[in-house]
């Protein structure tokens, strides 16, 4: 009879350890998924900032005014964004990678790179590159 009591105690302790391990794993999964959701939210926010600045730059390109904010004759030139350089918690850097003008048709092609960095968490950032043609 004594041996059965010891076996029951051992069984209960093993089941308790398994239950605690399962609970620990569930808590870890819950906290890591919360962290991932926060990172995705901040990434989406930085992409939205990049989209907004891209639209601003495309409007300057449509009006043929982008070259007033950078040197279009050289490659990899920074673009002065003025008040759009900082939007909320995000710092935006824009660079004109290349500008080509076709003398026959008058069309212009711009290649631009945008870098958006969260000033509170610098490791979280997004980079957007696009090519825009104005005819």
Image (spheres, helix red, strand yellow):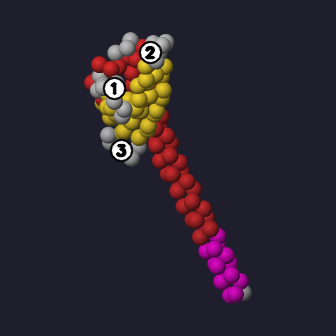
Labelled pair 2, 1 in contact (Cβ < 8 Å): no
**Position of 69 compared to 50: left or right?**
left
Q: Residues within 10 Å of mark 1 (few under 14, many from 20)?
A: few
Q: Nearer the viewer, mark 3 or mark 2?
A: 2
Reply yes or no: does residue 11 show up in magenta: yes
The front one of 109 and 93 is: 109
Q: CA distance from mark 2 to mark 1?
A: 15 Å
**Position of 104 compared to 76: left or right?**
right
Q: Is residue 42 above or below residue 4?
A: above
Reply yes or no: does residue 128 show up in magenta: no
Numbered label attached to residue 49: none
The residue indicated by pointer 2 is 103
Instruction: Name the spot of residue 57 as percent of width and height, x first.
Output: 39, 21
Q: Is residue 82 above or below residue 29?
A: above
* Residue depicted at 68% across the width and 81% down the height: 7
The front one of 134 and 11 is: 134
Tag 1 or tag 3, which sits nearer the N-term?
A: 1
SS for tag 1? loop
Tag 2 or tag 3, which sits nearer the N-term?
A: 2
* Residue depicted at 34% across the width and 30% down the height: 74
SS for tag 2? loop
Stretch of the chain drawn in magenta: 2-16
* Residue depicted at 41% across the width and 25% down the height: 99
The residue indicated by pointer 1 is 73
Instruction: Name the spot of residue 83 as percent of width and height, x first.
Output: 28, 24
Instruction: Name the spot of residue 22 as percent of width and height, x first.
Output: 60, 62
The residue indicated by pointer 3 is 121
Using the rendered image of the protein, determine whether residue 103 is visible from the camera's viewpoint: yes
Q: CA distance from mark 3 to mark 2?
A: 45 Å
The front one of 71 and 4 is: 71
* Residue depicted at 39% across the width and 36% down the height: 115
């Amino acid at each position: 009879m004594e041996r059965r009591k010891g076996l029951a105690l051992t069984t209960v302790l093993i089941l308790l350890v398994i239950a605690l391990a399962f609970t620990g794993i569930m808590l870890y999964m819950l906290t890591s998924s919360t962290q991932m959701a926060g990172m995705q939210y901040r990434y989406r926010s930085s992409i939205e900032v990049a989209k907004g600045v891209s639209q601003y730059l495309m409007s300057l390109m449509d009006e043929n005014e982008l070259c007033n904010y950078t040197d279009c004759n050289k490659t990899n030139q920074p673009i002065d964004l003025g008040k759009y350089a900082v939007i909320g918690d995000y710092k935006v850097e824009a660079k004109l990678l290349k500008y080509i003008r076709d003398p026959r048709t008058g069309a212009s092609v711009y290649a631009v790179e945008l870098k958006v960095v969260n000033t509170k968490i610098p490791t979280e950032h997004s980079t957007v590159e696009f090519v825009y043609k104005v005819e």
